[in-house]
Image (cartoon, coloured by chain):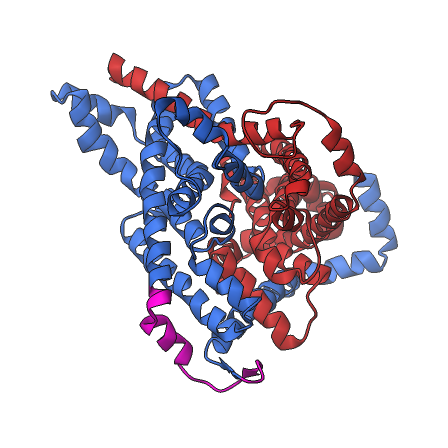
Amino acid sequence: MTHHAAASAASAGPGRRLAIYLHRRPRLRLGLLLAPPLGWLVVAYLGSLGVMLVSSLFRVDAFTGKVVPEVGLANFETLLTSEVYRTVTVRTVAIAAAVTVTDALIAFPIAYYMARVASARLRGLLAVSVLLPLWSSYLVKVYAWYVILAEDGVLNWMLRPLGLSGPGYGDVATWLVFSYLWLPYMILPIYAGLQRIPESLLEASGDLGARAGTTFRRIVLPLAFPAVVAGSIFTFSLTLGDYIAPQIVSNTQFIGNVVYRNVGVAGDLPFAAAYATVPIAIMIGYLLLARRLGAFESL
Amino acid sequence: MGASRTSRVFLRVATGLTLGFIYFPLAIVALYAFNGNTSLGWPITSWTTDWFGRAFADEGVRNALTLSAQIAVAATAVAIVLGTLLAFAVQRYSFFGRETVSFLVILPIALPGIVTGIALNSAFRATGIPLGTLTVVVGHATFCVVTIYNNAIARLRRTSRSLEEASMDLGADSFQTFRHVTFPAVRSSIVAGGLLALGLSFDEVIVTTFTAGLQQTLPIWILSNYLRPNQAPLVNVVAVLVVLISVVPIYLASRLSSDAGNVASGTR
């Protein structure tokens, strides 16, 4: 490499001169580095969000079906006053909350086992086992449940000898599928959070006479709580914004379904944009709350 | 750790059941790909490998597969350039608004998918850009930047600058130093991030449905065919293919980035 460098120093070609020019101007270098990615994110992403927020104030002409750029709050009025949309919002938030609680309950034991009981080798293996399905196709997983929950599907076949039957398609199926889909997002932060608890704290609790159950309740749970909140950000947000799973395993409407229908078939883009601000507002509130509970340090 | 015998047994059983819950649906779909019947009834009574041949011969499947691969490659290429530049800017310089930038890059993946989808949809309509392959690439690249950025910046933080200084002291200019010293150090992290981006793009549905217009990517193909009874066997096969295709790069990526936590930090 020194030969190479010495050779090009002697010739001092245009590349070399440019390198020297840039080397002396760190601000210009920074500008050149930042311009493409920031330009993209600001124009393509923030710009789009801005267009969406502005268009949520517009309305669609009932006769021509064209967007009329007149600013007004009519869309938001419909959202707040209409019984239908209130039901959809409540259903979406309720299922998001149920999914979050379910995932926390399922995730805690396996995360605890991984972090505190399993050997180092097994721990690595379990971490990969939890991660791999996180990245395998989302749609395939939803579709798998569509097959499983079918009238003559696996679940009913397994439950029939017990005299039971599965939930079929509907809100229960949606809850089940969402809990399944986002489970790894809950396991991983709790696992990381439990690993961070120093062993000495648990030993001290035991030395002071606390039984295992008491130590768990008064030491482990409070220290792991921020990690649970961190995981809940994912389970909650992902459920709020999804419309594919309800479309496949249910016939009830979620916020996402209404938004999608209004972008497509119904053709009321301003209303869709207005409804999309609901999950944004809920998520901002949720994130502020999560930050107060110390969840951001556990992300 | 003072976990009692009973609680250990409970934890072991719960872990086993959870893993079973996680892998059960994937196993079921894999079995259905070899189903000799066109119905989705269980138990499967006859077995065949015919559907794989049919799926590969099916023009709709082939076109969707090609389109998805093209989009994934294009979106990843854009994301690699943008994510790497951004990682260098944020890690190597201090400037006003640096915190905001690192927040801005995760926003497309942190906000619900429909928000990103409808925002892009409104913007494309407002500017008169027709929906198609290009708009899907724009959408995918936007949320893929974060995977490259996260991987590259984590590596840059761990890489000592003394090697670069040594290179400059030995007479290399900044381009040569970048080519021979800096880039080789971050290369594998960029590849890992790129592989994740490929998997993410290949699999994406929500943003895609808002930006694709009439184009059919592989997930969109599944979505529009799963309800058609005589297409169901093909959907099963495609589902298995999608899992295989998206797990391979993700597995490789997790091997390349040193710890599993990196992979998780790039998720949506």
Residue occupying image coordinates x 86% and y 46%: A7
Asked if residue B132 is among those painted magenta in the image, a careful observer would answer no
The residue lying furthest to the right in this view is: A11
Q: In which quarter of the image is the N terminus of chain B?
A: top left
Chain A takes which shade in the image? blue
**Residues drawn in magenta:** A63-86
Q: Is A270 rendered above or below residue B99?
A: below
- The colour one sees for chain B in the rendered image is red
Residue A233, image x, y percentages: 38, 49
Residue A77, visible in the rendered structure:
yes
- Residue B244 placement (x, y as % from top left): 65, 33
Q: Residue at x 46, y 55 (%)?
A: A241
Q: In this view, does A288 lie above or below B168?
A: below
For the point 51% across and 83% down, the residue is A62
Q: Where is residue B138 in the image (x, y as percent from the top left)?
A: 66, 60
Can you give x and y, in whole percent of width and height, for residue B261 in the image? 49, 36
* Rendering quarter of residue B215: bottom right
Is residue A123 shown left or right of residue B38?
Answer: left
Q: Which residue is farthest top?
A: B5
In magenta segment, residue A75: yes
Nearer to me, A55 or B240: B240
Indicate left or right for B192 with A148 as reference. Answer: right
Residue B95 visible in image: no
Name the one closer to the observer, A135 or A32.
Answer: A135
Looking at the image, residue B231 lies above or below residue A130: below
